[in-house]
Amino acid sequence: MQKHIDNERGIALLIAIIAIVVVGGLLIGVSTSARLEHRQALNTEEMAQAFAVTELGLSETVANWYAGNFNFMAVMDEVPIASASPQGAGSYAGNIKRLSPELFFLDVTGTSAHGRSRQRLGTFVKLQPLTVEIEASLTTRGGVRRAGNGQIDGTDLPPAGWAACTGTDDTAGIRVPAGGMVDDGGCPTCIDGDPRIEIDPSIDDDTFFNFGDLDWDALTAMATKTGFTLTNPDVGPTFGAGGECNFGDPENWGDPLNSGSTCGNYFPIIYAPGDLRLNVGVGQGMLLVEGDLIINGVFEFYGIVIVRGSMTTQGGGAGAIHFRGGVMAANVDLDDNRIAGNAQIQYSSCVVTRAQTAAGIGSQLRSRGWLQFFSWSD
């Protein structure tokens, strides 16, 4: 029988080469897969980061509603917004557009920290205006004593220099409940309005402490300036180095005497948790006083003033103390309000409307809270 001898030299090398190729292919596959998964994880992280920053832009804009700018936009006007997120997690930019007197659309694009991903979201925002019923130049639950050169006038008089302001809505000079005493100090013409004095039996606590869906506590919680007491703050507009309105200054209460300045549309809500004394300065917006309001010297305020206690004015020198808009003094202790010196309380429907408009806040619509326009990742 013939024997066949097989020569198997070199087979080990071939097997080794095949094994190297297979293992190398597996390693390349594993490495490629790991790299792709890592890249996918990074992209997912960047996308999540961009989405979070975009949501931050929506929530921050609504939560920190810039009433002094947004609330005075014309319909179809746009205002840009932009900011960086905390801890350097990214940034957002976009704009807010007014669609109607009460409806806005907020469009925000957020970018991740490394700029690899972007998200664009939009939401509808509804303006919730503050409603305070001002039905007289001075509404009070106690008595009123006028003296000196004090004047209380319900004639609707727009402030000088305020554009698009008219005066066509005369109201009562003084409004008091049944039994309310008004002493004109021997000067009947020093109290004017339509009527001069209105006796309103419906005046009660709700008149002074309930404002639509808000009560006194909710309204004072909205204050952007607070903590003032008997320290005689020298209030007035202040500006930054670039001429911008310095909103952070606690004594910046807006600029009613120059409506064209950067503080002209700044109408803060100011809250004094106790008695408040003011001597000099100007301000506008809403002034809320937990105790008594005492005015000495020369001071002007344009807007709505609500005092839980009583109000006393004693004008000094030739300057007049002006309250333009409407004043409400609840007189929780039923003290008399004394309007003396050179004080003047002048009704203005335009001032009241602007103060209420500026105090309005934006809130996201509950249905269709937000819309996703696009999502992009590098």
Image (tube, rainbow, N blue to C red):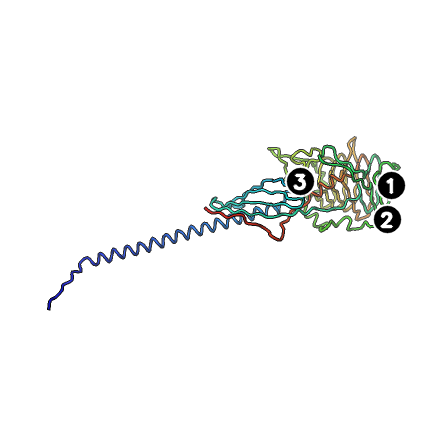
Q: Position of residue 214 (x, y in %)?
A: 71, 50
Dot 1: what SS? strand
C-beta proximity under 8 Å, tags 1 and 3: no
Of badges 2 and 1, nearer the viewer stands 2
- Does 196 sit left or right of 234 as displayed? right
Q: Specify the amino acid type for callout 2.
A: Ala
Which residue is more in the foreground, 254 or 19? 19
Disc 3 marks which residue? 72
Give residue 322's quadrant in the image: top right
Which residue is more in the foreground, 124 or 195? 124
Disc 2 marks which residue? 178
Residue drawn at x 70%, y 50% is 218
Disc 1 marks which residue? 183
Q: Position of residue 302 (x, y in %)?
A: 73, 38
Label 2 vs 1, first from the N-terminus:
2
Crowding near the residue tagged with mark 3, few <14, some 14–19, many ≥20 C-alpha atoms within 10 Å? some
Q: Give the CA distance from mark 1 to mark 3.
A: 40 Å
Crowding near the residue tagged with mark 2, few <14, some 14–19, many ≥20 C-alpha atoms within 10 Å? few
Q: Specify the amino acid type for callout 3.
A: Phe
Dot 2: what SS? loop
Q: Position of residue 11 (x, y in %)?
A: 20, 58
Crowding near the residue tagged with mark 1, few <14, some 14–19, many ≥20 C-alpha atoms within 10 Å? some
